[in-house]
Image (cartoon, helix red, strand yellow):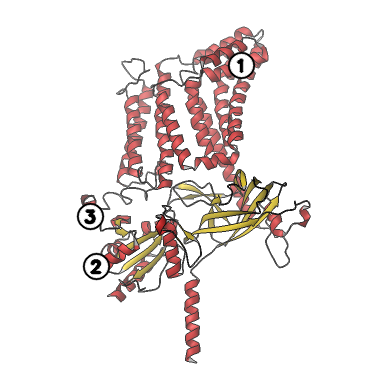
Amino acid sequence: MKKIVLLIALFITFWGANAQILDPVKWKTTVEKKSETEFVLVFDATIEREWHMFSQFTPDGASLPTVFQFKNAKGNYSLVGKTSESPYKKVYSDVFEVDEYLFENKAQFRQTIKLTNPKATSAKVYVEYQVCKEACIQQDKTFDLKLPITAITNESTLTTTEIAAKDTSDFTVIPLITEENKPVVSNTNAVTKLESKQEVSKSLWTIFFLAFFSGFAALLTPCVFPMIPMTVSFFTKQSKTKAAGIRNAIFYGISIILIYVILGSLVTAIFGADALNALSTNVWFNIIFFLLLVFFATSFLGAFEIMLPNSWANKVDKQADRGGVIGILFMALALAIVSFSCTGPIVGTLLVEAASKGGIAPIVGMLGFSLALALPFMLFAMFPGWLNSLPKSGGWLNTVKVVLGFLELALAFKFLSNADLVLQTHLLEREVFLAIWIAVFGALALYLLGKITLPHDSPSSFISVGRLLFGLLVLSFTIYLIPGLWGAPLKLISGFPPPLTYSESPNGIISSGSASANTTVYPDGAKSGPHGIIAFTDYEKGMAYAKAQNKPVLLDFTGHACVNCRKMEDYVWSKPEILSILKNELVLISLYVDDKRELPANEQYVSKETGKEIKTIGNKWSDFQITHYKANAQPYYIVLDTKANKLNEPVGYTPDSNEYQSWLTSGIAKFK
């Protein structure tokens, strides 16, 4: 009897330990044959209730996106476009201070491939993703999809799973596998789709209004503003009647809109609706965008002029002299070419910003920009008397151009910050970013207050009241930024600078002890962790240090992109009574399971537990957690003695600080 009880107890213990290995996402794959050489690979993910996984396009510097890698594509098949996905939800993360794009309940991904090797029989696809609830899990799967020989000709013969795979136009009804094998209407997904559409609509409206106001800004530059009276005068003189003049002016405005909308359409058509979004989250393209915006900014500040070839303008002018509808169309084109030195940087910046939204955002952006640019030409042609109320051209136009240059320069560093966050180089941490913005906006304030002059400024013995007030506003904003260097949250610019966790002193210089912060000598393998705690990122070195100090270990399985890990550090570890324990009574070893740095070739291996290739530091610590503790979620905390024995049962996300403190002290008490 005792033996039976003992066996049952061992079984329960073993089952309880293994139950910690979570797998909240179940995958089904389908292959659709479009032709003899083209196939669509479909990946359907069913996500457990209350869990969520992330879009391929979720912004950098937050949770990890879903990534698809086609392992045997080379020599066998090519990818046709990017991997598309079903609608996602946009949810603001107050931890990472960005909007995150996520899936709940269901997600579907589709990738079209074209065979280059007629003998290819399968597609091997590696998928890496993060899934979160109270804990976050870094997951990866490898699929071997067999390519069918015969084409699908009758859709009614498909299985339930295949019908779900083909239904991408409407993600409201998603067939589930039941005993009767019948489709089930999912109201949750209907809500998800509706919310996703609403978010996309809001995003496009944001782009439209941003572009619209940018169009008005372009209108107030030296290249465009002086052309308003010249153009209106042309229409009033050339038109035989007032009605004809108004009609021609309206067509002129519509021509301006068409030119810029066609430009947005070309960008979308060349790169693809989804490809633009993918590019915007790529490290190298973020760096290219940064360099491009710095180039535009220096042009606006007066270092040089961005000019299209004069021959283009001359040829277009000749066509404009023909008159009639064709002549008006070429007049609009001439405006776009002649004003390019002022509008080009703004248009370029808008296209970059629209790229981050994907879809038809570049078209919507160009529609908003061109509408603002065209409206004044049409209105003043209809009501020529209004021209008398226009301010005269002068030095203020160059001031507008310079202000735009400063704004573009500040925006440029947002793209460089994105690249730095992805690479985790810590070259552009929050303090450095804010220091740059303080310098940029401080210089802009001095410029507006007349303390700095630039190459194309007109000499003036005074500044206008409007310029003074605007200068004071910019100066106030600059002063507002300064406390951010010491840890202030700066909610007005939330989402622009790197998050508070990505800084030299994540908890503020004062709270982390500025007097001693720079003189602390850390043990080998350790660094300054949250709240100034000495944290080891190498298990062996941390254990050796704990043995030398005769202290218990807090083993912390965490991740750079783990939301609840950051919440524990921000709201639980920061409590004085807990912080004192972590600093004085324990040795902290933090192992990051999403560290993408590659292991040296001689340290890479295949896991005996999971059979997966272990290539990165994150893979190593994730495999370590699974192998030794039969768990794969983060955060995951274990109190160990100096021989790596558990002193109490591990815990995960524990937002109750009293409960977490009791758990820590119970482990320490057993050690003593």
Q: Is residue 249 visible?
A: no
As drawn, 335 above or below 410: above
Residue 645, position as x, y percentages in the image: 35, 73
Q: Amino acid at mark 3?
A: Val
Q: Amino acid at mark 1?
A: Phe
Residue drawn at 45 percent across, 68 percent down: 627
Q: Residues within 10 Å of mark 2 (few under 14, many from 20)?
A: few
Give the mark, 2 or 3, whose residue is nearer the N terminus.
3
Residue 254, position as x, y percentages in the image: 63, 22
Residue at mark 2 to residue at mark 1: CA–CA distance = 81 Å
User: Could you tell me which secondary element the residue under label 1 belongs to?
Assistant: helix
Horizontal placement of 573 versus 268: left or right?
Answer: left
- Residue receiving disc 1: 330
Q: Amino acid at mark 2?
A: Ala
- Residue receiving disc 2: 548
Q: Residues within 10 Å of mark 3 (few under 14, many from 20)?
A: few
Residue 3, position as x, y percentages in the image: 48, 89
Q: Which mark is residue 521?
A: 3
Please state which of the two labelled residues, at mark 2 or mark 1, is closer to the viewer: 2
Is disc 2 in contact with disc 1, using a CB cutoff of under 8 Å?
Answer: no
Q: Residues within 10 Å of mark 1 (few under 14, many from 20)?
A: many
Please state which of the two labelled residues, at mark 1 or mark 3, is closer to the viewer: 3
User: Could you tell me which secondary element the residue under label 3 belongs to?
Assistant: loop
